[in-house]
Image (tube, rainbow, N blue to C red):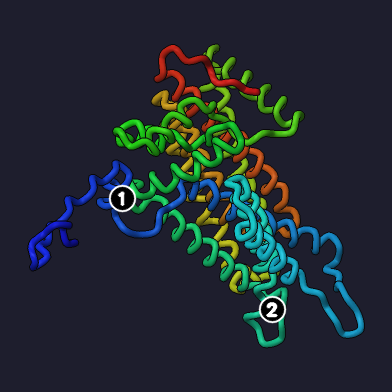
Amino acid sequence: MRSEPGGGPGGSTKQEPAPELGGLTRLRARLDPGIARNLELGTLFELFLVTAVVSLLLIRGLLALSGFPQVGGGGLHIAHMLWGGLLMLASLLLLLLFIDRRLLFWAAFLSGVGFGTFIDELGKFVTSDNDYFFRPAIAIVYVIFVLLFLVFRALEHRRRHSERELLANAFDIVREAVLHGRRAGHSAPVLAYLREHAGDDPLLVAFREILERTPPGPPPLPAPLRRLRSLALRLYVALVDARGLDRVLAVIVTAYAAFLLADAAVATGLYLGGPPRALLGKGWVAFSGLFLSTVVSLLLVGVATWHLLRGALLGAMQWLRRGVVVDLLLGQVFAFYLLQFGALVGLAVDVAVLLVVTGAIRTEQRLEHHRHQPGRASPSAG
């Protein structure tokens, strides 16, 4: 409201028309409030949790091989929990000091290693005598990992990504595309959103054009890894073209099911062959945990087999991957309790199968994406 020049003595007022809102402003006015989730939440969480579990198991194995040495002297003991805290601090500083989406993955990796190193010494903090070897601590660690898994999965799957979340991720993805000349692999939902809602807003139109002309691709890899990935992609495509992928996948599924049964059988033999008192003691918790996690993994592998028989290769790989993750995050913790560093063999098998299957899933998704875009070349492996 303001007085019009030349108005009457009373200073007649006239309300100015509200300026027309731009497309982005109108969009923001109707967006839902709240904190926006990262589109890569699931990938980052998986990297954190798997790294934490692997770190814990490796530390236990290395300490067992070295005779559990004490670092320090003169009444001092430098607990490796402190190194875990330093690694988690390093991951936090990366996020606070630098702006680069790639650092999210380094932060997830470092914080995972740090958390696994930290929580390995949980037994010292739940016992009055600081007992690192307090066996029930493994059950507490188990509960912590399960709760983390459930919380993160609930955040990832609680609902579809909202307009606010897609828009927030668009700013992040476009920044990385401008800085690094490549489009993040998870940018497809954002690009689809911009194509539908950009309208005539110059900023959103510019975002859409930047993403459309920026080639998609993963972060740059060292030359040896790039050649290995290229070889793996060519092998995968050759298997698909020769209709041999289903046979290879059937071998992997069968071999992994046999591994689960053998791993459980070895642990059962050692458990039953131990002192009679241990059968009703604390070792029963670890044996029960291993048995239940093996059953769950085998059920998931069974679902993968059912999808494979129906010809749904991508679905079979996804269910097999779930079975591997369950055994890696849960079963191997209990196996390590029963088998000591002998469980590192099972850990290596789980990690190898997880890497192979995850790579195959992502390759199949990329190929599927390009199949539905006529006129586009096959995805480059370089």
Which of pointers 1 and 2 lies earlier in the amino acid sequence? 1
The mark total stands at 2
106 or 132: nearer the viewer: 106
Mark 1 surroundings: few (<14), some (14-19) or many (≥20) residues within 10 A: some
331 or 367: nearer the viewer: 367
Q: Which residue is mark 1?
A: 28
**As drawn, is 175 to the left or to the right of 160?**
right
Which quarter shows the N terminus? Answer: bottom left
Q: Which residue is mark 2?
A: 124
Give above or below for 290 relative to 9: above
User: Which percent across, then down, holds residue 377?
Assistant: 51, 14
Give above or below for 238 relative to 267: above
Quarter location, residue 374:
top left
* Furthest residue toward bottom: 128
- Identified by mark 2, the residue type is Lys
Asked whether the viewer can see residue 254, the reply is no
- Identified by mark 1, the residue type is Arg
Asked which secondary structure carries label 2, the reply is: helix
Q: Residue at x 67, y 87 (%)?
A: 128
User: Which percent across, then down, holds residue 282?
Assistant: 61, 73
